[in-house]
Image: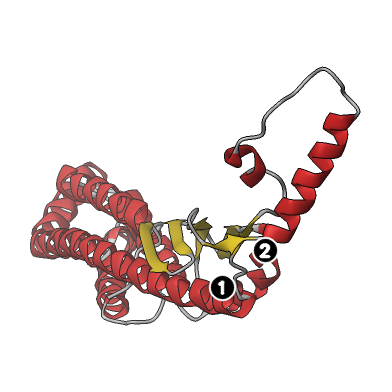
Amino acid sequence: MPRSMTAFASASAEYPWGTVTWELRSINHRFLEATFRLPETLRHLETNYREQLRQFAQRGKLDCTLRIDFDLGRTVGINLDIARRYLATCEEIQQLMPGSSTALSPIDVLKAPGVMQEEKIDTESLKIASLSVYDTALGLLIDARTREGDRLSRFICDRLGKIKREVANIRSVLPQLMAQQEQKIRDKLEQFAAVLDDERIEQELVYLANKSDVDEELDRLETHIEEFNHALDSTSPVGRRLDFLLQELNREANTLSSKSQAATTTHSAVELKVLIEQIREQVQNLE
């Protein structure tokens, strides 16, 4: 079954230094177009993310956001040497200010730059973590696109079945309609019987019969329906092919409408156009 291009997926994983979260949003597009929102520390990996995306999708406009929430408690201790220098500097400044005394609290010392030292994160570990979670998010996105594609395929198959029934209805009433049309023409030509010979009348009847004959259009409609069903059974991206088949279906429906000689076939031609347009709206979302 073809996949939809509309989906959302989110994946996250926790590590000793924090949490990595990917959010992926996908909508329909003629080609594969992706926008990445990345932390500056991983901006250089955008090419890697794009290459990984191409292994999962071929069409769609994607919005990919990576968020890294570092653990605020990731410290290895206090740099006492910096703390001592900070206190000594404060004492020297205090001596320049006779008559005033301000006591420093331990919290004030800890807030000084460099006193509390955070654990340094290995950039390679951060890269591996982001790629791993990204792979998980892409898998979830494809699962969502597949489920949505399955629902769209069922909708399309239902409309194709209705189109096939309309074609069958036209075939069933066509002989009767052709006979009625021929009789109507003969009745109109009776008043000219004195000036038109039988051979000329037969020629005119053949011409009008060929002009209103829709067997070829019905045959092509059935062929396009078979191709449509065959494409829907494929696991490869078929959105562009289905769009082409819809153009051909619509072309035959228009020809059928222009050749219509009775209200029955006119109604069927209109119904075909409605069904084809309903299918087109859904095909636009298929990869």
Relative depth, front residue between 4 and 104: 104
> Residue 208 location, x and y as percent?
31, 58
Secondary structure under the numbered disc 2 in the rendered image = helix
Residue displayed at 26% across by 71% down: 225
Evaluate whether residue 153 shows in this view: yes
Task: Residue 49: name its quadrant.
Answer: bottom right
Residue position marked by numbered label 2 in the rendering: 41
What is the residue that sits farthest to the top in this orientation? 99
Of mark 2 and mark 1, the one earlier in the sequence is 2
80 in relation to 125, above or below: above
- The amino acid marked with disc number 2 is Thr
> Residue 194 location, x and y as percent?
26, 48
Relative depth, front residue between 71 and 47: 71
Indicate the quadrant containing the C terminus: top left, top right, bottom left or bottom right: bottom left
Q: Are the residues flagged by discs 2 and 1 in contact, CB closer than 8 Å? A: yes
Task: Residue 51: name its quadrant.
Answer: bottom right
What is the residue that sits farthest to the right in this orientation? 96
Residue position marked by numbered label 1 in the rendering: 126
Residue displayed at 74% across by 56% down: 82
What is the residue that sits farthest to the front in this orientation? 99
